[in-house]
Image (cartoon, rainbow, N blue to C red):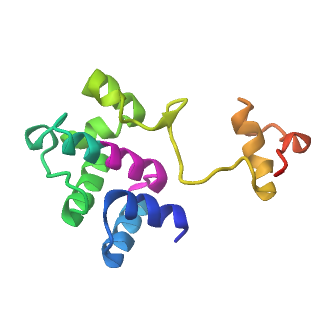
Amino acid sequence: MSIDHRILLAVQLGNLDLENIINAVELCNRYGLDTISTGSYIAWAMELYQRGIIDLEKTGVPLEWGNQESILEILRMISCRDGFGDVLAEGSFAREILGDESKDYLLEIKDLPIEMTDERLPQELCPWAGHLHEGGVPHEKPSFNRCPRAS
């Protein structure tokens, strides 16, 4: 389990129970959900819930920080596009459904969630990161000479 899984399905959601974190990662794997973006969108929904922008009537589950049962249930709901899970399954485009007030709390760039890493510095990440940041196509050969150097 990588650090991204632990952060985005754990600390970012206020979930500090190791067994629940492992279960959440396993559910994402079984459902075919990306753990990084899914964790980010659940955290966004929890922030909206905490601020009263969305409520239990809309979500169907209490999206409170650290609520382990709700984390597992919302993962199921997202994968089945059931209830509020259907909204979150839209990813960053859910902001159009949830309204203008929700947009202020969505951390994204180019409709993708912000990860908990910074790919600009590590040289070993440049072969794949180089073309992503410049709008290239995944099958194109990456440009190694454009890798940033730490100064």
Residue 109 lies, in percent from the top left, at: 54, 33
Q: Residue at x 20, y 45 (%)?
A: 50
- Nearest the viewer among 143 and 122 is 122
Q: Position of residue 17 (x, y in %)?
A: 31, 75
> Which residue sits at x=25%, y=63%?
66
Q: Provide residue 4's location: percent of width, then percent of height.
A: 52, 61
On screen, residue 5 versus residue 64, left or right, reads right
Q: Is residue 128 above or below residue 140?
A: below
Q: What residue span does the magenta drawing correspond to?
A: 31-44
Question: Does residue 109 appear left or right of residue 94 in this picture?
Answer: right
- How many marks are shown on the rendered structure? 0
Residue at x 20% of width, y 43% of height = 49
- In this image, 67 relative to 37: left or right? left
Above or below residue 15? Residue 59 is above
Q: Nearer the viewer, residue 122 or 129?
A: 122
Q: Image quarter for residue 148?
A: top right
User: Is residue 123 placed above or below 147 in the rendered structure?
Assistant: below
Q: Main secondary structure of the magenta part?
A: helix
